[in-house]
């Protein structure tokens, strides 16, 4: 198609979009040479993000919705088959239909083992084609699930606009990209998606993301996070509504400096989301970076580790992460695992992650400021150890007791210098909110006994028969 034809279709669409639904069966008549309606439809799909239009079931196009993205999904039971089909097609194109068998299967399994071992040693991974394919099999499904859970929470809070401009820094093999595309398409919105990914993982991203279909537009920048020209991207298309760092901070030499630079490309009411694995090293490293840019920098923590007390900042280790139900075993993983004995070595269905949601406008998920007359800040724990006190605290873990007799939960209020753990010694109807509350929920804890735990070098907040625990929001 010549550029003039495309431009005429665009100009007519811009003129008519506010007058009536755009019908390719009508619009082609206004274009010189009268291209086939199918050609007009394809141009409208490709230009949908720029024109701010969405396709209807009857084949016409109307102005895209405005306001927050309305999302219905809130759970992930499995990696969608349509995405898995594209992963398998990529592997078959590269290694043959029997990609999980023979030499190619052995190479993939050995590379996945190497990736896992390097991760445990905190060594850097070389992201060549084989590594990218191993990541696609082993990590893409759980990265998709993690991103879906968190993004749906952001949408439920009204933080994602229906016309969403996203920058995915260190996009990898595309887990968050697929989650974004699915969420936005299901909600009838538009996604202007930009990925920053210099490695061979970008080839996988290209393969698993469907071409622009009228709901999303994809641009892949094959540069490092440090080299990417953020200012030029903002000047070209405007600031971003969402900037995402997924499983990449731990690979940056100066993560806090990089994160702070990217905050400059965020819209005034935008959100910066950081996702990291749940292991101690990366999860606590995330909190260190969060503190650098939020307590000593330009950002505010929106969730989950909200600073409840003004003029305080946490100093505790805070190994804090969320856990969601496992996803079903992806067939692509089972296919790689079976030739190795079917032991589950190449199956990864756990959905556990540490995350931080940052903003520049001061907005917090929990907009509450405690009253010293009613609650004690954790920063003062040394003063009230062995006393009974009232606390306003955020639940920052699932049960950590691993089946022990006393359920154990990490707490925080944004002021703690040392970790605080709620220990449930006497369950009752008055304190059952401690166990049933979700990760990130605010709890009002009344009359809890605070003790020092020498073995753990932490404070125990003892919740017994005299303690009341209530969700505070």
Image: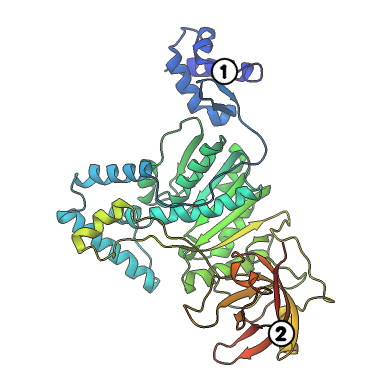
Instruction: Confirm whether residue 114 shows in the render.
Output: yes
Farthest residue toward the front? 429
Q: Quadrant of residue 417?
A: bottom right
Residue located beneath label 1 in the image: 22
Q: Is residue 329 left or right of residue 472?
A: left
Q: Position of residue 84 (x, y in %)?
A: 34, 46
Q: Position of residue 325 (x, y in %)?
A: 46, 60
Q: Is residue 257 above or below residue 212?
A: below
Q: Is residue 151 above or below residue 374?
A: above
Instruction: Confirm whether residue 265 shows in the render.
Output: no
**N-term mark: 2 or 1:** 1
Graded by Cα atoms within 10 Å as few (under 14), some (14 to 19) or many (20 or more), the crowding at tag 1 reads many
Q: Quadrant of residue 297?
A: bottom right
Which residue appears at 38% of the width and 52% of the height?
A: 199
Residue located beneath label 2 in the image: 381
Q: Position of residue 239 (x, y in %)?
A: 63, 43
Farthest residue toward the right? 373
| Secondary element at image label 2 | helix
Quadrant in which the N terminus appears? top left
Q: Is residue 77 left or right of residue 66?
A: left
- Determine the CA span between mark 2 and mark 1: 64 Å
| Secondary element at image label 1 | loop
């Amino acid at each position: 198609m010549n550029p003039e034809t495309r431009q005429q279709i665009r100009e007519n669409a811009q003129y008519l979009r506010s007058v009536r639904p755009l019908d390719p069966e009508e619009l082609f008549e206004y274009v010189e040479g009268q291209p086939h309606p199918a050609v007009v439809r394809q141009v409208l799909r490709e230009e949908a993000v720029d024109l701010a239009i969405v396709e209807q079931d009857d084949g016409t196009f109307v102005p895209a919705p405005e306001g927050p993205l309305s999302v219905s999904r809130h759970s992930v039971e499995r990696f969608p088959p349509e995405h898995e089909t594209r992963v398998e097609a990529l592997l078959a194109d590269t290694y043959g239909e029997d990609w999980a068998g023979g030499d190619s299967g052995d190479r993939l399994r050995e590379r996945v083992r190497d990736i896992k071992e390097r991760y445990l040693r905190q060594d850097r991974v070389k992201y060549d084609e084989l590594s990218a394919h191993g990541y696609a099999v082993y990590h893409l499904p759980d990265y998709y699930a993690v991103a879906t859970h968190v993004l749906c929470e952001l949408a439920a809070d009204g933080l994602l606009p229906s016309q969403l401009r996203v920058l995915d820094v260190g996009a990898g093999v595309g887990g968050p990209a697929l989650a974004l595309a699915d969420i936005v398409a299901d909600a009838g919105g538009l996604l202007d998606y930009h990925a920053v990914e210099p490695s061979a993982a970008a080839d996988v991203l290209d393969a698993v993301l469907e071409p622009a279909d009228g709901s999303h537009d994809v641009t892949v920048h094959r540069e490092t996070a440090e080299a990417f020209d953020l200012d030029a991207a903002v000047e070209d298309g405007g600031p971003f509504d969402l900037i995402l760092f997924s499983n990449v901070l731990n690979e940056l030499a100066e993560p806090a400096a990089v994160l702070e630079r990217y905050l400059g490309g965020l819209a005034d009411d935008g959100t910066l989301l950081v996702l990291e694995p749940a292991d101690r090293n990366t999860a606590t490293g995330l909190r260190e970076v969060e503190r650098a840019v939020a307590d000593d920098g330009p950002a505010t923590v929106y969730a989950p580790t909200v600073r409840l007390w003004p003029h305080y900042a946490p100093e505790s280790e805070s190994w804090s992460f969320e856990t969601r139900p496992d996803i079903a075993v992806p067939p692509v993983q089972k296919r790689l695992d079976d030739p190795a004995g079917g032991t589950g070595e190449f199956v990864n269905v756990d959905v556990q992650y540490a995350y931080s949601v940052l903003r520049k406008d001061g907005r917090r998920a929990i907009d509450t400021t405690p009253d010293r007359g009613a609650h004690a800040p954790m920063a003062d724990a040394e003063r009230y150890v062995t006393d009974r006190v009232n606390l306003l605290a955020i639940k920052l873990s699932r049960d950590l007791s691993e089946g022990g007799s006393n359920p154990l939960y990490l707490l925080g209020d944004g002021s703690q210098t040392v970790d605080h753990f709620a220990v449930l010694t006497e369950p009752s109807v008055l304190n059952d909110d401690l166990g049933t509350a979700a990760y990130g929920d605010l709890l009002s804890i009344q009359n809890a006994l605070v003790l020092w735990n020498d073995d753990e070098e932490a404070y125990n907040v003892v919740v017994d028969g005299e303690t009341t625990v209530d969700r505070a929001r």
